[in-house]
Amino acid sequence: MKDLILLVPDKNTESGIEALINRFDSLHIRSVTYDIFRYPQRDPGIWKRADQFLRSFSNQYSFALTLFDYEGSGEMDQSIDEMTENLKTRLENNGWTARSDVIIFNPEVEIWIWVDSIHTSSSLGWNSYQKLKEWLIEQNLWDTNALKPSRPKEAMESALLYKRIQRSSSLYAKIARYVSLQSCHDPTFDRFKQILQKWFPYK
């Protein structure tokens, strides 16, 4: 039996999560055996059918973690907390009692990209995170007093387009592999770390 199965909506999320999950020391967890599955129907499919998909794996993994975008889910009339509890209940009812959890990126996975780090800016083609932020403020893509862009994917795509760099899953992996995890200030990322630390504490 492996430790963990992760269900994600796309290649970008998969690449970022895979880079993160292998940073055992930075996450303050023991080494973990895992598999990551991409769901063909992406965010809405995960929201609607993750419990059904993961049911057949309940005897093969100790824990299950499901991750998807709030904005892409097609269910934004519910709060993130409501959706999280709904899906956790369905997972519990399908073989994952006390062994599963749900991370819903708000509004999308790119919110984790925006960490004040040279690794972030250089991956996006900029030699300074501050210069990147200032340019995005000039483009009305970042509110001056905000910690992160309110439209993280649009901000990322605009910064890459300006530097004539194509968005790819390798960018997500590169940023996730090298940025300081202590510098990522996002509630869902904090939950991600807490979940892993609870399931896989240092021995």
Image (cartoon, rainbow, N blue to C red):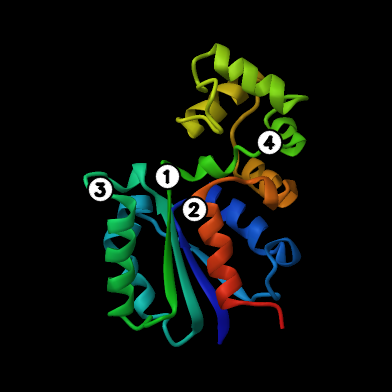
Residue 68 to residue 139: above or below: below
156, 203: nearer the viewer: 203
Which residue is most to the top?
138
Which residue is most to the left?
77
Label placed on residue 75? 3
Mark 2 lies on residue: 188
Query: Quick one: label 4 or label 2, which is nearer the N terminus?
Result: 4
Query: Quick one: label 1 or label 3, which is nearer the N terminus?
Result: 3
- Measured as percent of width and height from the top left, residue 24 is found at 71, 67
Q: Residue at x 35, y 59 (%)?
A: 46
C-alpha separation, residue under disc 3 versus residue under disc 4: 31 Å
Mark 1 lies on residue: 106
Q: Are marks 4 and 1 in contact (CB under 8 Å)?
A: no
Q: Are marks 3 and 4 in contact (CB under 8 Å)?
A: no
Q: Residue at x 35, y 71 (%)?
A: 53
Amino acid type, residue under disc 1 in the picture: Asn
Mark 4 lies on residue: 116
Q: Secondary structure at mark 3?
A: loop
Amino acid type, residue under disc 4 in the picture: Asp
Q: Secondary structure at mark 2?
A: helix
Query: Quick one: label 3 or label 4, which is nearer the N terminus?
Result: 3
Instruction: Give the foreground label among 3 and 2.
Output: 2
